[in-house]
Image (cartoon, grey):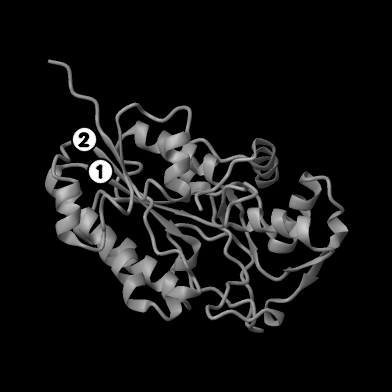
Amino acid sequence: MAAMSPTFFVIGATGQLGTALRADADAPANIRALGSADVDIADAASVSTALSDLGPGDVVLNCAAYTDVDGAESDTARAYAINRDGPANLARATRAAGAWLIHVSTDYVFAGAAATTTAPRRAQPYQPGDATGTPETVYGASKLAGEQLAVELDPATTIVRTAWVYTGGPNSRDFVGTMRRLEASRDTVSVVDDQTGSPTYAADLAAGLWELAARGRDRRVAGAVLHATNSGSVTWFAVARAVFAEVGADPDRVQPCTTAQFPRPAPRPAYSVLSPTAWAEAGLAPLRDWRAALHAAVTLDHASVD
C-alpha cells in the first residue's frame, strides 16, 4: 500500500507569510490553512481541536506570531502567550502525532547592540549556533522563549529565523509598502541609516519554506536552527532609496537620520544580519539577492493583508 502524502498545516494562514505560502505556485495541494479565526495557538484546547486529525508525517508550519515590536513592550502577557506558549502548544501536538513542526522565528532573538547606544557593533552575520544572549525587547525575548520551548517539547522541531519581512504592495503595512505611500504623499522622507539587516521578500521566504517542507524531516534539518533571508545586507535608508528608484522617484528625496532622532518604545538592533550558511549546508537553495527580490516585489505589485 502506498504511503499517504502528508498534510501541510499552515498556522497564521491569513497573515503576511501565511498568505505568501498559500499563494506560492509550487505549494502542495494538500494544505490546511488555519488563521486566527480557526485556531488560537495560545490556547492549548484550541490547538488540540484544530489539529485533531494531525497524523504521522504531517507538517505544521507556524507563521503565527505577535509581531508588533513596540506594542509588545506594554502588551507583554499577550506577546508571551502567542510567541512562547503558542509554539509550545504546537510542539506538544506534533510530537504526540509524530508530525513535524517548522517554526518561524526572528533576528530579534539576538541581543546585539541597540542602534541608540555607543556599544561596539557586530560586523559579522549571526550563525544559528551563536549565543543569543538576553534580547533587549519583549518581542525578541518572547520569540526566543518560544524557540526554546518548542525544541524542548518536540526535539525534531526545525526553527527558521528570518528578518525584515515584507510583501511590498502599495497597501501593505510593511516598510516597503509604507515607503511607497510616503513617496506619493511627501516631498522628502527621513529614514534611519544606522540599522543594518537583510530585507526578506515574503514570497521568496515562502518558496524556501516549501522547499524545506517538501524535503522532509531528515537528519540535516530535524532539530536544527536555520536562517533564511534574502542575501546581502543594507540599512533601512538604503532600502527606502531603492524603493523610490523602483517606482521611478528620485532617491535623493530620502534623507538619512539616526535611530536616536526617532525614539521608539522598543530598542532596535544596530546589526541583525543572519548568515545563510546553515541553510545552504542543509542542501536548500539560497534566497536571491535582496535588491533583485525588491524589484520583483514592486514589479509584481503584490498587496499585503490589511
In the displayed structure, does residue 243 sit left or right of residue 146? right
Q: CA distance from mark 2 to mark 1?
A: 7 Å
Quadrant containing the N terminus in the rendered view = top left
Q: Any mark on residue 294, and which?
A: none
Q: Which quadrant would residue 204 be assigned to in this image?
A: top right
**Which residue position is annotated with label 1?**
100
Give yes or no for contact between labels 2 and 1 (Cβ–Cβ under 8 Å): yes
Q: Which residue is mark 2?
A: 57
Note whether residue 133 is visible: no
Q: Secondary structure at mark 2?
A: loop
Above or below, 305 relative to 81: above
Above or below, comparing residue 270 to residue 229 in the picture: below
Question: Is 36 above or below relative to 19?
Answer: below
Q: How would you rate the neighbour count of disc 2 (Cα within 10 Å): few for under 14, some for 14-19, many for 20 or more?
A: some
Q: Mark 1: which amino acid?
A: Trp
Q: Position of residue 24 (x, y in %)?
A: 47, 33
Q: Is residue 141 visible?
A: yes
Residue drawn where x is 64% and y is 40% of the image:
301
Task: Describe residue 18's horizontal placement relative to residue 114 as left or right.
Answer: left
Which percent across, then down, holds residue 56? Answer: 16, 37
Q: Farthest top residue?
A: 1
Secondary element type, mark 1: strand
Amino acid type of the residue tagged 2 in the rendering = Gly
